[in-house]
């Protein structure tokens, strides 16, 4: 009897340890998955799926994957045109051009987005819950089409750009370059953010009320990264209207270079070598998605990426249960900590 009790206790302890380990490994910052799906990475990561209607992505009914970023849309009662997802996909492919000076690093970041299932819900005006997909995908923010940007093409452009950048930094860069871009304390991007706060260039005051420390740190870093990258890429000066102060006070790349040397060094060594500038032609069509002007033109499909040609062929659309397949994990837990 004593021996049976001993083995029962051991089994209970194993179950408790397994549950604790699973909880600890679940997410970073409240949304970034830490357990990879290595089988999710195609041999050529520079591929785009067709827009696919499928009910395994509940509560969403439509999806498109582009360079590792899964766009999901059409929860009950919403019906975005396929053209909307296609123009967002064009923007993503242009953000990762074949002309990048470090294609190996670029590929590593994109593969991390596949591996850790980066995703963005795309909503029409009314934002709805993402439901059970929160545990299967790394979904840290959303894109809203119309809504407060209705009648504001520049605002719609920045809405799409900002949240693509969030997905890239929160998932791709976080896992591919953890000591540099991990959205946790002690990393290089965290040091860059602290420099900006100390100099009065960036304020994270709006996020101070987030109760969970890990989630608060992730949001503070992701927002700083967006402001800094949008400024060095010229997006801020072209499309952000009015002042972002006190949250962000810079408007030009030269200001970032002179006032934020920690971020500038990090950018020059990493993101400047992998990210491109989205074309004016594509951004113009993205601006029309907000819905009060002429409809956007039909997006070229399949996408013919400069230097890569036809980038169709993502195998996700051929899966019988794509979102269920994405939820499968087959690698060790990888929690990013300060390098």
Image: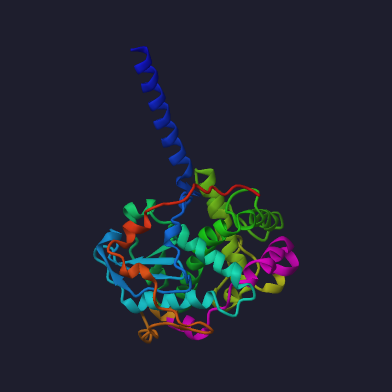
Q: Is residue 128 visible?
A: no
Point out the stretch of residues depicted in magenta.
Answer: 256-285
Residue at left 32%, top 53%?
Answer: 131
Q: Going by the picture, which residue comes out furthest to the top?
A: 2
The x, y position of residue 330, in whole percent, is: 43, 52
User: What is the tally of numbered marks visible in this picture?
Assistant: 0
Residue at left 71%, top 70%?
Answer: 255
The x, y position of residue 21, in whole percent, is: 46, 38
Quarter the N terminus occupies? top left
Residue at left 55%, top 56%?
Answer: 175
Q: Is residue 288 visible?
A: yes
Q: Establish if 220 lies above or below 53.
A: above
Q: Establish if 325 lies above or below 243.
A: above
130 within the magenta span = no
The x, y position of residue 245, in whole percent, is: 60, 63
The x, y position of residue 194, in whole percent, is: 67, 53
């Amino acid at each position: 009897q004593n021996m049976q009790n001993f083995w029962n206790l051991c089994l209970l302890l194993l179950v408790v340890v397994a549950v604790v380990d699973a909880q600890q490994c679940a997410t970073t910052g409240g949304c970034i998955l830490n357990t990879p799906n290595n089988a999710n990475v195609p041999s050529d990561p520079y591929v785009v799926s067709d827009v696919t209607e499928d009910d395994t992505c509940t509560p969403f009914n439509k999806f498109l994957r582009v360079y590792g970023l899964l766009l999901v849309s059409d929860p009950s009662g919403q019906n975005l045109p396929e053209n909307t997802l296609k123009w967002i996909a064009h923007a993503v492919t242009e953000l990762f051009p074949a002309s990048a000076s470090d294609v190996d690093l670029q590929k590593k970041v994109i593969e991390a987005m596949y591996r850790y299932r980066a995703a963005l819900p795309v909503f029409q005006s009314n934002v709805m819950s993402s439901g059970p997909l929160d545990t299967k995908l790394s979904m840290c923010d959303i894109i809203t089409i119309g809504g407060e940007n209705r009648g504001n093409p520049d605002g719609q452009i920045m809405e799409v750009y900002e949240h693509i950048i969030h997905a890239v930094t929160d998932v791709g860069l976080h896992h591919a370059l953890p000591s540099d871009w991990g959205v946790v304390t002690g990393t290089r991007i965290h040091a860059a953010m602290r420099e900006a706060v100390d100099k009065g260039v960036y304020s994270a005051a709006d996020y101070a009320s987030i109760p969970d420390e890990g989630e608060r740190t992730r949001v503070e870093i992701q927002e700083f990264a967006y402001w800094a990258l949008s400024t060095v890429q010229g997006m801020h000066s072209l499309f952000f209207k009015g002042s972002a102060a006190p949250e962000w006070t810079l408007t030009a790349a030269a200001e970032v270079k002179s006032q934020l040397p920690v971020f500038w060094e990090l950018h020059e060594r990493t993101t400047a070598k992998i990210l491109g500038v989205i074309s004016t032609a594509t951004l113009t069509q993205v601006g029309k998605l907000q819905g009060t002007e002429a409809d956007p033109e039909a997006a070229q499909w399949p996408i013919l990426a400069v230097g890569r040609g036809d980038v169709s062929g993502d195998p996700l659309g051929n899966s019988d249960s794509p979102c269920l397949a994405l939820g499968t994990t087959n690698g060790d837990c990888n929690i990013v900590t300060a390098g």
